[in-house]
Amino acid sequence: MAGQALAGQTDGYHGHEMMGGWGGMILGPIVMLLVIAAIVVLVVLAVRWLAGAGAHPGLQAPAAKTPLDILKERFARGEIDQEDFEARRRTLESLAQLDSALWHRPESVIVRGGRDSAREV
């Protein structure tokens, strides 16, 4: 008798409701796609973060100002007069030439003399 009562149960219970009914069948794949998309986004962000900011062309640091740029700005603001500007500009140019001469020496030249001999000049 108990078996008949269970078989004839009409309180709205159906087997498909156990998995969420139609709502679970529609929302399940959507939620799964959202989870996969979130994982992909996290992986992309992690790779970009590990690669560093240099990988982003729009996020490059502004170019550093040269001493001559700073001197020109000070002259434009009126902090120094033209005579002082010219004297400091000449000093900076002479320092730049000296620096260039020290750091940009021509590489040594290899002169081949004879058949198998080579010497560095």
Image: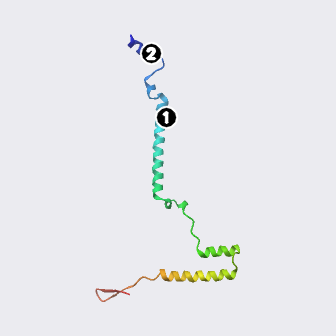
Q: Which residue is label 2 attached to?
A: 9
Which one is earlier in the sequence, the residue at label 2 or at label 1? 2
Return the residue found at the far left: 116
Q: Residue 94, located in which quarter of the rendered image?
A: bottom right
Amino acid type shown at disc 1: Leu
Relative to 54, say whether 103 is above or below. Answer: below
The quadrant of the image that shows the N terminus is top left
Residue at 61 percent of width and 83 percent of height: 90
Identify the residue shown where x is 69% and y is 77%. Answer: 80
Kindly identify which numbered label has been placed on residue 6. Answer: none
At a point 68% along the width and 83% down the height, the residue shown is 83
Residue located at (62% from left, 73% from top):
70
Q: Position of residue 71 (x, y in %)?
A: 64, 76
In the image, farthest residue toward the top: 1
Q: Secondary structure at mark 2?
A: loop
16 and 97: which is toward the camera: 97
Three-letter code for the amino acid on which mark 2 is drawn: Gln
Scheme of colours in the image: rainbow
The reply, left or right, for residue 8 in relation to residue 112 is right
Say left or right for 45 vs 1: right
Residue highlighted by disc 1:
27
Quarter of the rendering containing residue 81: bottom right
Which quadrant of the structure image shows residue 76? Answer: bottom right
Residue 103: x, y in percent?
A: 48, 80
* Tag 1 secondary structure: helix
Q: CA separation, marks 2 and 1?
A: 28 Å
